[in-house]
Amino acid sequence: MTEMQPLLARRGHALKGRAAVPGDKSLSHRALILGAMAVGETRVSGLLEADDVLRTAEAMRRLGADVTRDDKGVWHVHGVGVGGFSEPDGQLDFGNSGTGCRLTMGAVATTPIAVSFTGDESLRRRPMKRVLEPLSLFGMEWSGRDDRLPISITGTAQPMPIEYALPVPSAQVKSAILLAALNTPGRTTVIERVPTRDHTERMLRAFGAEVRLEGETISVQGEAELTPAQIAIPGDPSSAAFPLVAALIVPESDIVLEGVMLNPRRTGLIETLKAMGAKIDVTNMREQGGEPVGDLRVWASALKGIDVAPERAPSMIDEFPVLAVAASFAAGRTTMRGLSELRVKESDRLAAIAAGLKACGVNVEELDDGLIVDGRGKVAGGATIATQMDHRIAMSFLVMGLASQQPVRVDDGSMTATSFPNFTALMGNLGADIQ
Ligand code: S3P
């Protein structure tokens, strides 16, 4: 484990200027995995070079793909083809990354090799049954202590196509199944009652797979041959969320976030903040890497509390920590429900947010499946927050410290390397005081 690195955020100037957040994490994992499953060379620009994604790059190498970065920052993936993975020596260690781990489980489930998976303390606590169960229906076998990492998987030589209704709305589970389907004869179907991010479906098509979408069902034709792709990864809306909320709550701020991916299944935070009174303009809409992209202009705004519709949760599932920060600076009550999934993220996020807000003097109630935040327009701050190995908890509370009366310290800022390695520098360029 890397050493704990405390960071302190304090109130200062308004945030001004332009910034481009790093590449989208979800797309980065998928580009590496699909590139590794294609025959020939896939080129990826704008890849997120953060710890989570670098673990996936390493896992793809260990499974036989050639993955390199050139000096212009373009990543080259020479894939082994669907069904072409070879058995790695030793364990694949996915660090903090649920996405890398669960998607790779799917990618190897229908190839007859044995693969062991592990991760850091946070990932070893997270439930894996949600992917192991559907992948077992293809014929994959697994062993481990209950359903927590470390887990060993033996892929099946004779996969059977499945039809599976997702019991929890999870893009990771959906994606694991779609990846397992690629080396399976026939059509595999996933039914999702609540739409989740559709990056795998979109990117599979870019790699030449046949994906059918009909209402709630997604199906993919197996024994697919993937053709390599050229992918330019746009900015991660989940990372943009931090400077965005910072600009809203630090008086007189006015910033532009360039090239942010705006897939409608990822924009729940922007819609919610607008409903709270946030001044956010979306300009320069375009397409990049098969995804809608735009620039966001954000002005400091007087926010008011709202009820967040639970149906909106999947489109902003990673943004609740920073939404809770915005809600603390709003006037009035914000209610967030339907969030039991937040208990099994990098930390128990409902508990971590509630503890952090309380420590900063915010009136918050933790529910089984949500939070009620009573905003009073201002926040005392003056606390040290337990990061709990969760990058988004660290960054959210640093954002809080930029507008609270007293500074806010997080006990381990090094976790930002998981998804947003230049967080402190980028925020500093906009004028934020984080040290
Ligand atoms: C992700 C899906 C979500 C999200 C995670 C990334 C993905 O997880 O929280 O950060 O890339 O598919 P779940 O599938 O567990 O909801």
Image (cartoon, grey):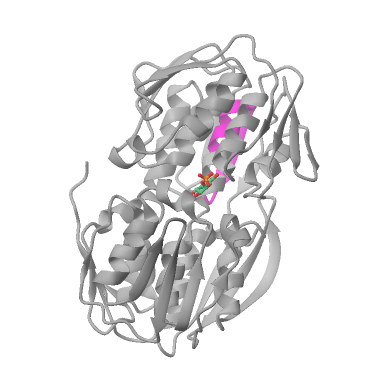
Relative to 254, is 296 above or below? above
* Residue 424 appears anywhere in the view: no
How many marks are shown on the rendered structure?
Answer: 0
Q: Residue at x 74, y 31 (%)?
A: 220
Identify the magenta region: 32-47
Q: Quadrant of residue 247?
A: bottom left
Lateral position of residue 149 relative to residue 202, left or right? left
* Residue 11 appears anywhere in the view: yes
Relative to 342, is 104 above or below? above
Taking depth in this image into account, of 399 and 209 the one nearest to the observer is 399
Task: From the top left corner, tell me how far across and down residue 68 is, in percent.
Answer: 46, 35
Task: From the top left corner, tell me how far across and down residue 403 is, in percent.
Answer: 33, 81
Task: From the top left corner, tell me how far across and down residue 65 is, in percent.
Answer: 51, 25
Q: Residue furthest front?
A: 368
Taking depth in this image into account, of 93 and 57 the one nearest to the observer is 93
Q: Residue at x 51, y 33 (%)?
A: 130
Relative to 85, is 258 above or below? below
